Image (tube, coloured by chain):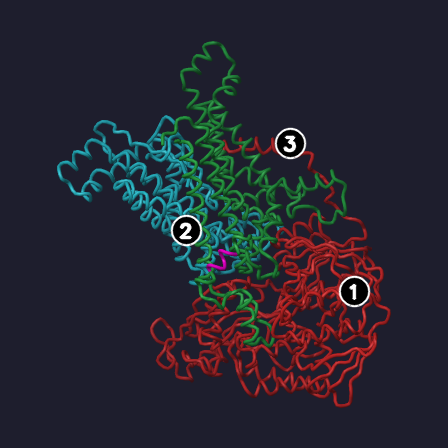
Chain colours: A red, B green, C cyan
Amino acid sequence: MSKRWLAAIPVVAALIFATTAIGSGTKAASSGTFRLGTANGIDSLNPYVAFNQDAYSAFEYIYPVLVQYDSHLHFAPFFAKSWHHSKDGKTWTFTTQSHAKWSDGKPLTAADAAWTINIDIKYQGGGAANEAGLISHIKSASAPNATTLVVHYKLAPNPAYVLGQFQQFYILPKHIWAQHLGRNGAGLKTFPNNAPVVGSGPFNLVKFQRNNIAIFQRNDSYWGVKPKIEEFGLQQFSDDDAMVTALQHNNLDAIEAVPATAMKTLRNGGFVVSDVPGLDQTDFIVNSNPKKKHHRELLNLKVKEAFDHAIDRKKIDSVTFLGAAQPANSIIPAPAGVGWHDPHLKTVSFDLKLANQILDKLGYKKGPGGIRVAKGQKMSYDVVAPTDVQSIPRTFQILQTDFKKIGVKLNEKALDSSAAFALMSGPNNTYQGFDLAMWDWTALIDPDFMLSVVTCAQYGGWSDSGYCNKQYDKMYAQQQVAKTVAQRKQIVWKMQAYLYKQRPYLWLANDDSVDAVSKNWVGFKNTAQGPFNEINIQSLTQVHQK
Amino acid sequence: MRGIDYVLKRVGFAIVTVFVAVTINFVLFRLAPGNAVSNLSRVPHATQQLRHALEVQFGLDKSKWQQYVIYLKQLSHGNLGVSYENEQPVSTNLRIALINTLPMVTLGTVFAIILGTFTGVLAAWRRGTKTEGASLSSALAFYAMPTQWLGLMLIILFAGIFPTGGMTNEFLLNPPFWTHMKDLASHMFLPALTLGLTLYGEYTLIVRSAMLETLGEDYILTARAKGLKPRTIVRKHALRNAMLPITTLIALSLGYIVAGAILIETVFSWPGIGRAVYEAVLERDYPMLQGAFLVLTLSVIFFNLVADLLYFKLDPRITE
Amino acid sequence: MSDVTFFVEAPTEGGKSRRGFVVRAIRHQPAAIAGLVFLVAMTITAILAPWIAPYPLHQQVGPVFGHPSWQHLLGLDDGGIDMVTLLIWGSRTSLVVGFAATFVSMVIGGTIGVVAGYFGGGTDNVLMRITDYFLVIPDVPLMIVVAAIWGPSLFHIIIVIGILLWTSTARVIRAQVKSVRERVYVKRARALGAGHTRIVLKHVLPQVAPLLIASTVLTVAVAIFDETALAFLGLGDPSRVSLGSIIESAFQRAAISTGAWWAIVPPGVLVTLLILACSLVGGAIEDALNPRLRVAHLSARMFRIRPLVGRGQDAV
């Protein structure tokens, strides 16, 4: 249609009209500003509301935390200079930084820490529910003087557990938040905590616009290691393409998470692309509710074992994740800190013959259409597929094809995540609503959280598998109170081996954390949680121009 | 009097429609599974106590009818509820977003009007020639393109010349006024152009048909016989005739344009109301969605009313 | 609502049949012929998809975003799947949604339009008010709710789009039926005691048919457009490939920044051509119904821009 080119006329006219707009300062900002791009963003500046990873990473830089992880994922002092615990393990004492100030000039002391802990305990059933996991087992906290924090526990927790909890615990300024308690702490959640945020960290959050931008400026009265840059900004894009394009045209200096498809392009474009093992794992969930009514053959460990052998993890890694992933084999991913992952666990082999043998031995004969019949029911299942995980559709295709070869029919049932969870846990937290599902988990460095999601207590909470096992729950409680770190590790390994056989989850892939930085900058450190993370403040305090 | 009758009738109708829209909005979102409780109670050690507290907070412990009445009451105070995502009032979130959208949408409409008028006049004046065909074809072609795809095509073409995402360069700190304006304009150009290109086809057709109507009239023949220049004829007579349908069309479009901006703002990461809707869809932030769509629906109703009244005012031939 | 509509008459070209009208309308416009040919070709391709697609649909046949080559004329997408295969299957889904949703909306809209126009009075008022209220139902939240409650399946998308599109057809048909109802031969038939059904079927529908066909074709265009938009917002059926979902996955998987234009340009071009073809064909029929003014109504699209503007108002 050659006539269509005439349509170019109005376009050119518009171009001429807008000529004044071209070339207006979109190039590199001042040398002291680091521009970071993300496709996720900060959902809220209020720690009692925020859910997104970027929000927590932001808090890491603007709020004091007692301890952080060093480069080797060992605990290092932060707001707490040192610590020790009583002989019976129930009382922990932290010595905190002296002469520290909040960004509005008011003194930052151990009293703020104690206060935050105490209101979190008081309102854990209401406004402070988000933090309930971090103060479990704490009876109370006090600050006998400005640099001493004393925490009283109901039992004697494992030292690594205590520090792991406090590593994620953001201390808030009492003089700001005490005015916003509201009824039963409900006010804690509705306080917007707008920028400029009163905090105390290497940076102050001075500007925030939802879905758009967050600007952090260097805090010159900071009590710790001062950043090399003057400020950094976190810019949110609605999609990866826009973000990568912005990086390519020098409108950004780095991006947090590079889509697998753009890795090669960015490397070829001269950017430094870092690909390290990450903490995100995708899974195939088998409803393991022991009280399940339908398709009870799925409770049979042998059936789950057969399914496990029908999963081609290599193919999933290469097709869905384009090689930026490792096969997963445990609820605790390998990059979790300090050897929490049980190294003895081997990835389950992809062996269709073996899978068929196991199912044959169980007597589940193949019927019409090649679908096996188990106890009078066809082995044809709906697989709940939440739409918020992008990798699921491609992975499902692979699984569906391979499962067909072992006589099991899978039907994709896509639902958005809240509808999916409502179905899976329903009706009324009885976990009768589904047979199979796919989802993903983002683990933390400390294993406690991931281990908790398959406990009976998480019915209606984090449990998406309906798994409930008394023996497992016992081990879970034990690892929290193990006397030494080594002992805790033993229990954590035992738990993983136990779940390895119980298979509430068939683990698929552990995807990498991939970031990209312009070659003009050094010191921006990628970790299992990405470069902008809740692990420590190294990235943005160390990054600087070459 | 006939005129006032008509006006009252249309206004009354608009009000009733608003009420129906509000009700439909309420019902739609109560049907959706997953409410405040399931979204927000997924915290470690969630207890029944917490769930109940959340239910009370969002008013979900009351009967549907009671919830409806409360909803209406809140609406009359401009309270659109609280967003699940950031626990802030929906109206605040939307207000900020709307302010961001309006300049871009206005510029886009201006583009559409300019393009549409130009091509419409061209097509009518050069009736039956290739120029007319070309004008119409290009108008139709742009109209047929999926908006989000057209935006992506413009990104491919113009990346590097114009910024392809965001509203301003956020890293320009405290820029002087004109730098800021230039920055804003350069970011606004591509999304507004996308909007303009998608919209202008309709304007072309309307302008053209209005012009054709007029150009066939006797008094035009007279004007030409008198030796008046074509340009004068077009401007003085034909274009004036097109004012009625064009104005009505613009008014009608305005109501929908803001809604149509969803696709454009998503492609260009423009932090306006369209993007707020997109993010709310992703997060299933029902209060935000409910609020946004109420606002969009109301704007449609409002602009339709404006179009109605304009049409009545401008067209002397209405028989009622 | 304030949609102002044309009501037009199918000119009675002494002696020639109504049925031939549509054919004649198209025959005089080369663009419309091209459009019709294209539509037919796409429909045949879509039907024959399982046999003519060069590669299996979900099979990776090369590297991610592989370049176009002789074996893969339009390259590969982000999963290493052949683009030509994707486009063939994708247009199949898009056309299915387009036709099915249109069918739903035609049945609803046509029925309501005929009933309202024919019976007039109170029935007309009630039906028109209902139509107006349907106009204010916001599409995207309806789609979300449907997706959340019943799952985002193709069937539900078809129903949702169909429910949203019938209004313009209803209004146009109603206006036309109203004018036909006043014709002498209809009045005579009534005087002779013919029943309503007979009159509608024998006298009204044939007059209305060309307009209905035009409306149908134009609605298909909008339905296809809507499907593309819904897929882009992530509300499509994730287990199906449609032209909209191809654009969406290219967008999500950073096709542009990787320079893989072939993953994103062809699906959009196809959608554009489909919509263009429908618009040309439908427009040609409408033009023939009122040759002097040649105003094609670019009907509802993109979250309901509905500029049905012209002369005259809904006949009272």
Chain letter of mark 2 equals: C
Give the secondary structure at mark 1. Answer: loop
Residue occupying the far top of the picture: B226
Stretch of the chain drawn in magenta: B68-73
Amino acid at the residue labelled 1: Ser
- Determine whether, in the image, residue C20 is placed left or right of residue A188: left
Spatial CA span between label 3 and label 2: 40 Å
Q: Where does label 1 land, which residue?
A: A200
Q: Where does label 3 land, which residue?
A: A16
A180 lies above or below B149: below
Spatial CA span between label 1 and label 2: 52 Å
B92 lies above or below A460: above
Give the secondary structure at mark 2. Answer: helix
Of helix, strand and loop, which mostly describes the magenta segment? helix
- Determine whether, in the image, residue A90 is placed left or right of residue A301: right
Pick whichever of labels 3 and 1 is earlier in the sequence.
3
Q: Are marks 1 and 2 in contact (CB under 8 Å)?
A: no
A198 lies above or below B115: below
Residue occupying image coordinates x 45% and y 10% = B225
**x and y percentages locating residue A332 in the rendered image:** 63, 76
- Determine whether, in the image, residue B150 is placed left or right of residue C208: right
Q: Where does label 2 land, which residue?
A: C161
Chain letter of mark 1 equals: A
